[in-house]
Image (cartoon, coloured by chain):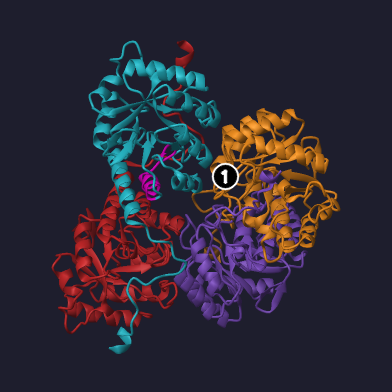
Chain colours: A cyan, B red, C orange, D purple
Amino acid sequence: MLTIADKTFHSRLLLGSGKFASPQLMQQTIQASGSQLVTLAIKRLELNKPQDDLLTPLRALKIQLLPNTSGAKTAKEAIFAAELSRDALQTNWLKLEIHPDPRYLMPDPIETLAAAEQLVKLGFVVLPYCSADPVLCKRLEQVGCAAVMPLAAAIGSNQGLQTRAMLEIIIEQATVPVIIDAGLGAPSHATAAMELGAAAVLVNTAIAASSDPVAMASAFTQAISAGRIAYKAGLAATQPHALASSPLTDFLAAL
Amino acid sequence: MLTIADKTFHSRLLLGSGKFASPQLMQQTIQASGSQLVTLAIKRLELNKPQDDLLTPLRALKIQLLPNTSGAKTAKEAIFAAELSRDALQTNWLKLEIHPDPRYLMPDPIETLAAAEQLVKLGFVVLPYCSADPVLCKRLEQVGCAAVMPLAAAIGSNQGLQTRAMLEIIIEQATVPVIIDAGLGAPSHATAAMELGAAAVLVNTAIAASSDPVAMASAFTQAISAGRIAYKAGLAATQPHALASSPLTDFLAAL
Amino acid sequence: MLTIADKTFHSRLLLGSGKFASPQLMQQTIQASGSQLVTLAIKRLELNKPQDDLLTPLRALKIQLLPNTSGAKTAKEAIFAAELSRDALQTNWLKLEIHPDPRYLMPDPIETLAAAEQLVKLGFVVLPYCSADPVLCKRLEQVGCAAVMPLAAAIGSNQGLQTRAMLEIIIEQATVPVIIDAGLGAPSHATAAMELGAAAVLVNTAIAASSDPVAMASAFTQAISAGRIAYKAGLAATQPHALASSPLTDFLAAL
Amino acid sequence: MLTIADKTFHSRLLLGSGKFASPQLMQQTIQASGSQLVTLAIKRLELNKPQDDLLTPLRALKIQLLPNTSGAKTAKEAIFAAELSRDALQTNWLKLEIHPDPRYLMPDPIETLAAAEQLVKLGFVVLPYCSADPVLCKRLEQVGCAAVMPLAAAIGSNQGLQTRAMLEIIIEQATVPVIIDAGLGAPSHATAAMELGAAAVLVNTAIAASSDPVAMASAFTQAISAGRIAYKAGLAATQPHALASSPLTDFLAAL
């Protein structure tokens, strides 16, 4: 069970709701994945007509909505969007995203920390998207974030655990759940993230932009479960030399 | 479904039977994994008392036994062991292993090809353990091997897909199943192998020497399934730049 | 030529002065390397007796001293150390290091940016050690830092370019020199860093703790030159398939 | 000094002569590189008019010519080409290449070993291009090859040390020089190969197809020297944690 703030979840897969070919496909995919935490961009909502095309199918799923501030370039913009979203969606859960750079969508550590501190005080359950920076993650935790969401690689790049050495340190030092976000492009990346001890992973592009999102979601779900089990059982260390699976004997000589 | 020679299998996990703490644990692990193809070293069998400690629990599982010639240093030794094993175990399936080097247990390409050719003529279903050498794999296929089993890394090293670039070529060119053997130490390695298009993987040390073989077997089973689904659905290409999951708009500016 | 602030340097290797077996060995190594920028910990100086064991041999080399604030845990501590150092060493160049974490010595992005902004206003030439965070590097540049020094891996870990994907983005976006700092453990790491387009690299442990620091310094110097030349000439793209070095013909058939 | 058979060389860079824009550029590049061993495809020679465009500039350089059998698909073809080449070029040195596969130019282990054994008996100094297969390399050595030339990656792919784990074993076990061949696309790859303990590297595409072959050759030469020095001095082990370059003290607290 994954516990974030005061809620528990069976699933360790967070899904993004962007890039799906249709709301129906999004809905089917979320169901197939078993995901219980789905993020959606506040800017995609028509906040004054909340029964919009995106929101209605999400509401039907009885999941925890995780509105995100994607598109915000400053703490001020993010906080403004967060307040609007809380009123409209009736949830204080928030994925905080502040990325001033349009090319790589890299998060801004300074604005993110400032906004996180503020939003926690305003009563939000804050899950910040952030660079794979161990001290930053520790500070986000210290201002009261419910989890940290360091990036594996650039959003949508499918490059996998490019920041692995930093993620290992972050996981070792964290006392809140570490959710690996951004850049996971294949189930093997998700398995590896879970083997490192991540509490969960967020996937969007690799599933939504797949030729078969429903199948790919199920692949990620199994991959995450596999990695989690392996983490709990403990992976063996790598060995510099071979270790015979079958103990060598004088069998043939003895014949 | 995995088809090798004239048999089909639901499971794409081949298990080794070495290194388990007890025959009971081996039996439970095989059951938990769903594996239908289990390899065992001919030299570990007391061939004239076939109801030995290892064989009885294996027989009870209704799996395809895959006796291996581990310990053989030449084609001649391997063929001799194969003949003994066919008589004793009543199966013509054979995992061919010839590794003269005791330190890294690296397979010998020359003796392996020579033995494979001979054993096929003698009526065996031959699955050879071999180096990740594309031309060698093609030749093994041409002499009639039912599958090829190139190594990912040294046996028991847990290092994962160290020969990845060669495995990709082997898989692209093969017309028989490619089963990745040796060196897979974590479920993420198995997922990645399947994502490349491997037909199956063989695991022994990483499961048998785990603190919880039953759990680890189940992790590998899920990992393999995840990788297989992803391979069939098609993985997205990696991107040099970020691609926004949430389409950027002038949402905030418009408020 | 490497230009930082208003100075130019022939060498693109910055050396650390810690961990050498003796001041003599340090001096010989710096000379062998051709390095013109050498960092030293302010805390290692006896500031009121500036002719100390470390400083005298450094002064004799006619290099640019780059005092560092290693050991500082806050912006305030770093600024205090910087002011002391400027008085004692008669240089306004400063390598800014703020790492509250004693285990991995990871830099603090918030305190580092705050200190950098302050120190620039106080007239320092500031070269900050920082995480491989593209937005942070851009911000450090914007407050007036003369260069940025993102980490490749944890200090002294010798792990090489663990943050490679982030370093590529940083280099692409920077308008000040990017100096790769921390974790470079082998000349091949330095070559690779320069091939990415880094302006320079800083090495300490891998040279000072080597069995032969003078030889290893010369290896790094050549490695850096090799990488720089390759960067300027332009590396070829990797190819998925083979490209014959020797055009294939019907030569043999024609004989 | 690199010793192969009964000759010694200052340079540890073997160059290919294919793909250069002109013979003049080839000649200048070889000179700039200091290479003393240059390979050329026998099939490119007009063997009955040996003063051809390629050969004349090579002869002028006083290097050891290393004719190669590129294009040969069988041992028989390779031996035939070798005999022709020995007569025409007056050297018994030979780079043995047998690759039946036109797409990846992967070497054939069986034909290569058979041809090598034969050619040694015929008085050739044989340097075989081969897969990164530790047992094959040992066998090539045992039949009398003067060196082994395992591949790093597919010819012309520029992918670097894709077979690194196997190369490490090959180098550990070899008693003849190990020359890493094929796939080295950047000076950092060459440095890394030398750090592993390779005796030399062969480069063609990455230099000849560069926008500035003379500069790139010089980069590789320095890269190789750097890696060799580091290998001899001994690289430090990687560390899981940070090791402070500057010993931490209570300096600031004491002020």
Q: Which residues fall within the magenta stretch?
A: A179-195
Q: Residue at x 81, y 43 (%)?
A: C89
- Identify which residue, B202 or D96, lies in the foreground: B202
Q: Position of residue D108 (x, y in %)?
A: 46, 67
Q: Position of residue D233 (x, y in %)?
A: 67, 67
Chain bearing mark 1: C
Give the amino acid type for the residue marked by disc 1 in the picture. Met
- Identify which residue, C44 or C220, lies in the foreground: C44
In the image: residue C240, left or right of residue B112: right
Q: Residue at x 64, y 35 (%)?
A: C75
Up-down relation of residue A31 to residue D79 (above or below)? above
- Identify which residue, B164 or C126, lies in the foreground: C126
- Identify which residue, D127 or D77, lies in the foreground: D127
Can residue B219 be found in the magenta stretch?
no
In the image: residue C86, left or right of residue D13: right
Q: Residue at x 40, y 39 (%)?
A: A176
